[in-house]
Amino acid sequence: MKKVSFAHMGYSYLGFKQLLEEMGFEVIVPDNPNASTLDRGVQYAPEFACIPFKTVLGTYLEILDRGAEIIITSGGVGPCRAGLYGLLHEKILRNLGYEFDMCVFDPPLTGLWTFFRKLRKILKETNISWLAFIDIVRRAWKKLKLIDELEQLAINIRPYEVKKNDTTRTFNQCLKIVEKARSLYQLDNAQMECRQLLNDIPQDRSRRPLRIGIVGEIYVMLEPFMNLDIEKKLGEMGVIAYRSIYLTNYANSDILSHGTMDIRRIAHPYLNQFVGGHGQNSVGETILYAKNGFDGVIQLAPFTCIPEIVAKSILPKVSRDFGIPVLCLTIDEQTGSAGVETRLEAFIDLLCQRREQMEAKNNESLLFGY
Amino acid sequence: MSLRIGFPRALFFYSHFPFWQAYFNRLGIEIVTSPLTTKSILNNGSREAVADACIPIKLYHGHVMALRDKVDAIFIPRMIKINKHTTYCPKFLGLPDMVKGTLDKLPPIIDINVDISNNLWGLWSTCCGISEILGCSRRLSWSAYLEGKRYQKAYQKLLLKGYFPLQAMAKLEGKPIEKHTNSGKLNLAILGYPYQVHDSYISLDVIRKLIKMDVNVLTLEMIPANHLYRLSNNLPKRLFWHFSNLVLGAANYYTLHKKVDGIIHVTAFGCGPDAMVDKLMELEIREKSNGTISFMSLSIDEQTGDAGMATRLEAFIDMLHQRRQKK
Ligand code: SF4
Ligand code: SF4
C-alpha cells in the first residue's frame, strides 16, 4: 500500500491518522513542527510567503524524507494565498527532485463534482465501499470533536489549577487515551474518562481570571508551535483565552458550508467585504468579544498575512469605538518566546488595572445610587 | 463652484484613471490627482499605515494624505472584480476600510463597489451608484459613462502601441508626447504591477535607467489583457488575483515568443501575492526556456538605494551582452 501523509495542524493529526489508517493506507504521521522544520521551510520558500506556508513546506520535506508517496492537503477558494499553497508547494518540491503525488481537496461546495470524483478514485484504489467509508469518516469526525471539547475544557481549567502544569500534563494524558479509542463506543468511554480526569485537577475557584478573546489566522491559532503555546502561557498567567476557531467548527462553518455569515454581518460597519482568510472574522469576533464583556482581545497574525493586515488596520478603530484593548502579535520566524511573554505580561497588567479602575468606578456609582 | 474630487495617484490609477477622469469631468466635477510620488508622500504613508503593509498600500495612504485638505471628497472605490475569473488582491478589497480605519480628518469618501463579474453592463451599475450619491441625472451619467469608456479605449490603444501609462495619459490630454523608439540591442521585459513599475519614485525609475543603457523595454501593458489571461491559465489552478494573472501571463508570453533576452520582475516589498508569483515565474521561465532567458527579481523597499540598484542592473545587462556574443 502507498505511504500517505499530510500537513500537521494542531491536534488534528489524530483524526486524520485514524481516517487514513482505516482506509488501508500506511500513514506517516508528521511530527510536531519545530524550529528545524521551520528552518528547512524558510530555506526553500519565497521570502515573503506567510509563515504557515513555510512551516508546512518544512513538514512536507520531513515526511518526504521519511518516505511519503502521497500528500493529502486541503485547497481553498481565495482570495487569499492558502488556496494556492498546494500548487506552489508541489512545484517547489518537484524542483528539488522529490517524486510524489499531491492530492488537493478543495472545499466540496466549490466543486461538488470534482470532490466526489477525487474521492471515488481513492476509494476504488482502497477497495472500500461507500458505506464503510461513511462509517470511517463519522468516527474520525467524532474523534476530532472530542479533542476540541477537551481542549476547551483544559483552557477553562488551567487558570484555576493549583499546581502549575497539572492541566497540560493531564491533557496530554487525555490525548493518549483518545488516540487509542476507535469505535464509537470506545470514544464515548474515552470522553467520560477524560472529562473526569480534567475535572479532577485540584482547582482554586476563588481566583478571578481575566477573559481574553483570541482572533486571527487559523493555522497560527491551531498550531501551538506557531503561536508559541499562547493558550498555555495565558492560562498559566491566570487568563481564560477563548478562541473562536476550533478544527471541527472551523470545518463546520468554512469547509462544509458557509455558516459564519453572522460574524461577517457584525463586521459590516467596519469591513464590508470578504477579504479572504479570517480577516473579516477577526474584526467581527473582536466586536463580539467586546459586546460580551471580555477584558481584551489578542490578534495573531502571520507576518505578511494579507487578510490580517487588512484587519489590523481596522482593529484600532474597533478598539476605540467599543473600548476593548487589542494586542496585535505578528508572528514570523524571528518571533521569540521571551519577547512574546513580556508583551503578554504587559498586556495583562494593563487589563488588570483597567478592570480595577472600572470596578472602582462602578462601586462609586453604586454608592451614589444608594 | 464645482465640486472637487480627489483621486490618489497610486494603485489602480495607472490602469483605470482615464475612465474616471473622463467620467467625472463630464459630470461637471473637477478631478484632482495627487502629485507624483515624493519622499514626503512615501514617508507620510509609511508612518500612518499599518507597519507590515506592502509599499504600494503605504504609498496609497500617503497619496490620500496629500489630497485630504485640498478636495471636497476622495474617490476610493472598492475594486472587487473586473472579470469573472479573478478578484483583486484582498488589500484592494479592504482598501476604503483600511484608509478610514487608519487616517483621520478625512473628507467624505466615495467608496463604491466596483464588481463587474456578473453583469453585462460593466461599470454602468457603479456609475449609477455614483450619480445617485452626487445627485446627477441618469442621462448625464450615461453620457459620461460612454465618454469614459471611449477615453479608456483610446488610452489602452496608446498603451498597446508602446506608450508608458503616464505618457499615454499626457497624450490623451493633447500634449505632444513622442514615444520612445526601440533601437537598442537587448530586449528586456520589465514585469510587475503597474502601480509599482510605473511609479518612478518607488521603482527607482528602473525603466528610464534601462532605456539609458540602450535597452528596449517591454512591459505587460503592451499585450492585450485577454491574451495575458489565456496565457496565465496553464497552472492546475488559476491565480486568484487580477494583476498577478497579468504579470504571470506576460512572463509566459515573453518566454514563449522568445523575443526577449531577459525578464526582470519588479516586486513590491511586502507584497503577499508576489511571494507566490515571483517563485512561480522563476520556476516557469526556467522550465519553459531551458535557461535561455535570464530572470532577475528586483524587490524594492524604502531603504533600497539608487546606486545599489544601478549596479545590479548594470551587472545583469553586462551578463546578457556576454551571453549574446557567445551565441
Ligand atoms: S490567511 Fe494569511 S497566513 Fe493564511 S494563507 Fe492567507 S495570507 Fe497566508
Ligand atoms: S497585490 Fe501586493 S502590492 Fe498590490 S496591494 Fe496586494 S499586497 Fe500590495
Image: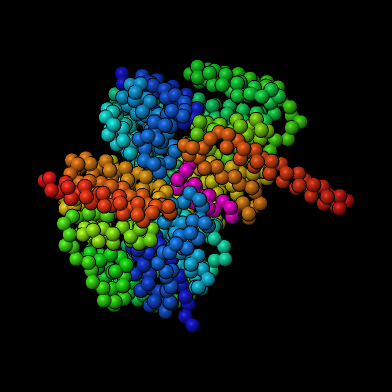
| Residue A165 as seen in the image, left or right of residue A95 | right
Report the residue that reaches farthest toward the bottom. B1
Within the displayed image, which quadrant is ligand 1 positioned in? top left
Magenta stretch: includes residue A45: no
Quick check: can you spot residue B87? no
Residue A242 vs residue B104, the one in the foreground: B104
Residue A36, by quadrant, is top left
Identified at 48% across, 67% down, the residue is B66
Name the image colouring.
rainbow
Quarter holding the N terminus of chain A is top left
Identified at 52% across, 56% down, the residue is B47
Specify start and end residues of the magenta stretch as a single range: A302-318
Above or below, A99 against A107 in this view is: above
Above or below, A296 against A96 in this view is: below
Quick check: can you spot residue B296? yes
Identified at 61% across, 32% down, the residue is A233
Identified at 37% across, 34% down, the residue is A43
Q: Position of residue A147 (x, y in %)?
A: 54, 26
Q: Position of residue B71 (x, y in %)?
A: 49, 73
Report the residue that reaches farthest toward the right. A370
| Residue A346 as seen in the image, left or right of residue A14 | right
Residue A98 vs residue A102, the one in the foreground: A98
Residue A96, by quadrant, is top left
Residue B142 vs residue B34, the one in the foreground: B34
Q: Position of residue B85 (x, y in %)?
A: 32, 52
Q: Position of residue B260 (x, y in %)?
A: 18, 52
